[in-house]
Image (tube, rainbow, N blue to C red):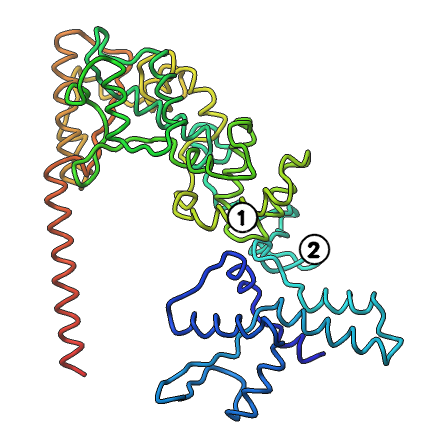
Amino acid sequence: MKNIVKRRGISYLDDANEDGESSSSEYGKAVEENRKLLADKTPGQIQLERFEKYGQVRGDFTIEENGEKHRLLNVFSTSAYKKEAERILTKQQDYNKDITDEFIQAYLTILTGKRKYYHGPGNEKSCTDYGRFRTDGTTLDNIFGILIGKCTFYPEEYRAAKASYTAQEFNLLNDLNNLTVPTETKKLSEEQKRQIIEYAKGAKTLGAATLLKYIAKLVDGSVEDIKGYRIDKSEKPEMHTFDIYRKMQTLETVDVEKLSREVLDELAHILTLNTEREGIEEAIKVSFIKREFEQDQIAELVLFRKSNSSLFGKGWHNFSIKLMIELIPELYETSEEQMTILTRLGKQKTKAKSKRTKYIDEKELTEEIYNPVVAKSVRQAIKIINLATKKYGIFDNIVIEMARENNEEEAKKDYVKRQKANEDEKKRCNGKSCSSI
């Protein structure tokens, strides 16, 4: 029994088995073979058979049967060893009165117990800044929580998960306010924006191109008449589309439409921060003390997180939930994008520095900007400001939303050039390695 505790298997294999995951690799096939054998045998029985037949148990070894090589691994899940220990101890109860149910439970607790990965090292009596028990006296629920950045405008608030409902709504609204459409005002109305939001949330599948077609139909125009959207490296339109919210609507045990904004935001935070079943389950139980989620719902959310890791792996927004909640009504009611609104509300930090000149010296301002594309964009912006100042006088505020580098033709050419140089360098290095061998 002591040996089983010392060699108690791999716990993460249990999660893999629950997900139905399998691997096409040799390692994965060997582990899968062990899992099938465990249907009617214990790890000990499998190990005994292999020892008697091949003279080896531990490690990773290859055998040859019927002219084919076959890989064997001494790798079993912790739950398999737990079942074996239960069978042994239950049988031993017939011969030893000291082996009580309480003893068996205590033994199994030791066998399956492990430090939670999100707690890190240390304990209450041995504090360390690498674990949840910090040297400053604070205790963290999750050591990875401190890695989340703080909001640019509310430094005391943590940034929101990009998967949160609030962040998805904010991002799409900001995209919509950047659009120029073929209407009298050239902008979408509040009612139209609300229609688009509801359409995006309810669509089964939705890409930027489809969303633009819907907007064009809404304003009685064509997609070619719509300007101001972002484009990706393939010159295709790029817009936020509530992709995570729509994906969550496929959940069978959770009615996403009935969940409040606050619950959705907190759930997104949990699923972004935690990647493993244990962490997700505990975080949901701690955060939702009113038991908003039953065990079967939590189990489905765990599987959903694992199968959609790319969505939740997008990380964290620049802004906090608190700030976005303040800005969302402004995005609906006005046609301004986020930076203009932040400036108007007085949240954009400014530095007062003046050389008491009427116009801005573009050369001096761009001399420390090393990216030629950015420097060019800044110079062009300054020229426009100087011309506008000459015509209209001094402005109270000027808000500039810079173009993305990958939308500039020059930047794209430079990117392709760097990629090719890297590939050539790799080929050259590989050639040297081969010749030296």
Q: Which quadrant holds residue 338? A: top left
The residue indicated by pointer 2 is: 124
The residue indicated by pointer 1 is: 302
Q: Which quadrant holds residue 85? A: bottom right
Task: Tell me where residue 417 appears, x and y as whole percent.
Answer: 11, 51
Image position of 142 (left or right of 190): right
Distance in Å between CA atoms under marks 1 and 2: 29 Å
Tell me the kind of residue under disc 2: Glu
The quadrant of the image that shows the C terminus is bottom left
Please tell me whether residue 102 is drawn above or below residue 47 in the rendered image.
above
Tell me which residue sits at (71%, 67%) in the image.
110
Tell me which residue sits at (65%, 76%) in the image.
6
In the structure shown, which secondary structural element does the residue marked by tag 1 occupy? Answer: helix
Image position of 351 (left or right of 414): right
In the structure shown, which secondary structural element does the residue marked by tag 2 occupy? Answer: loop
**Of marks 1 and 2, the one in the foreground:** 1
Q: In the rendered structure, which disc, 1 or 2, sits on the residue that comes first in sequence?
A: 2
Task: Tell me where residue 137 appears, x and y as whole percent.
Answer: 66, 47
Is disc 1 in contact with disc 2, using a CB cutoff of under 8 Å? no
Task: Tell me where residue 330 appears, x and y as whole percent.
Answer: 40, 15
Is disc 2 surrounded by few (<14), some (14 to 19) or many (20+) residues within 10 Å?
A: few
Is disc 1 surrounded by few (<14), some (14 to 19) or many (20+) residues within 10 Å?
A: many
| Residue 31 or residue 128, whichever sits in front | 31
Task: Tell me where residue 1 appears, x and y as whole percent.
Answer: 72, 78
Tell me which residue sits at (35%, 22%) in the image.
173
Image position of 323 (left or right of 208): right
Tell me the kind of residue under disc 1: Val
